[in-house]
Image (cartoon, grey):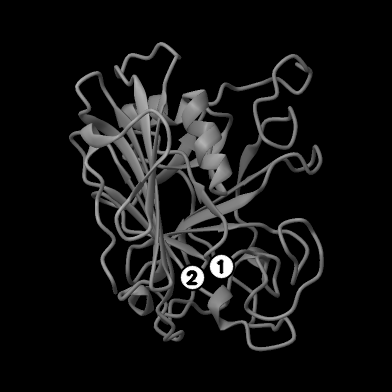
Amino acid sequence: MATLPRFAPGALLVAACTAPTGTTATRIAVDTDNQLGIVALQIEHGELAGERTFELQGLDAFDHELASVRLHVGEIADLPTFRPLDPSTHGSELVITTPGREPVRIVSGETRQWMIPPMNDDATWKQFGALPAVHAVLEQESITSVAGRTTASPTDTTYDAYPRGEFQPYTYNCPSSFLQAVTQTGDTYVQQCCWTSNYPYGDYYTPYTLFVVPSTQMMVMRMGPRAPCSNPDGSYCSGNGCFYGPNGFSKPYYQAPIGPAAINTTYDEGIMCSASAYGVTFPPQVGSLTQGTCGVSAQSFYY
């Protein structure tokens, strides 16, 4: 893979500028008071030899990085280790970095849209993700983060806490019909399966499942269920280019846990499934789904 150059934080101007080898960088001020001391965001885009990168850094008054989000779309060499029945290495990796913690790396075959689930035990990320400027930048990159959002009552119409409406999501044990009968690694069940949804209050928030694959201890997140073989806007599609596959779920997003894999519920961002260090709440679940198609083989949708 060709290497895109890093742009030195102290070298940026307030306006957009162009760095060598097709990399563009922008710096914007953060006007929102915050306990982290972030006063500016540095945003960098790069494209080279078919590889695309995005980087968002939160900087203090001395240009020290306090938090960051980095996205790489292109060849991900270890992607087949997460899904051994699919040899393709084309996909994406999303890396979230905060001080004093190991970086969180999320890997997927998806290349258009991403979601960062709540990280219940990372106070810095929750504050960083809650900054309006950060939320706006991530949204432009098709990265949804629910960090730091305030719980809203279904009867409270003064504050739209979520992208698609005011009804907060809830958590449920995963139904068997949401899960595969056999995983790509040969597992016949998953651990700690949690489903976040607005059910039964309507279609106001993108639902997702979060669970652990027993043999690898990888956490897996999938958006859905939505209409099978569809795009994010609900239109019909065919093949692996669909966003929602034959069973109505997105391609899996894999995350190696920091420490023992633990999925729990977080309440300060709505009631949502969260990667957490606070213990296990959700039971194992056996799946009943078998592989389907969206006009052609859709192996990349199976975890």
Which residue shows up at 26% across the image and 49% down it? Answer: 258
Which residue is labeled 1 in the image?
A: 251
What's the amino acid at mark 2? Gly
Q: What distance separates the C-alpha of mark 2 from that of mark 1?
A: 6 Å
Asked whether the residues under the numbered discs 2 and 1 touch, taking CB atoms below 8 Å apart as contact, a structural biologist would say yes
* Residue displayed at 63% across by 83% down: 291
> Outermost residue, top direction?
33
- Nearest the eye: 180 or 14: 14
Residue 132 at x, y percent in the picture = 52, 24
Residue drawn at (66%, 21%) of the image: 152
Residue at figure coordinates x 55%, y 68% from the top left: 286
The answer to whether one can see residue 276 in this image is yes
Indicate the quadrant containing the N terminus: top left, top right, bottom left or bottom right. Answer: bottom left
Q: Which residue is mark 2?
A: 109
Instruction: State the SS at label 2.
Output: loop
> Which mark is in front, 2 or 1?
2
Q: Identify residue type, mark 1.
A: Lys
Q: Is residue 75 left or right of residue 284?
A: left
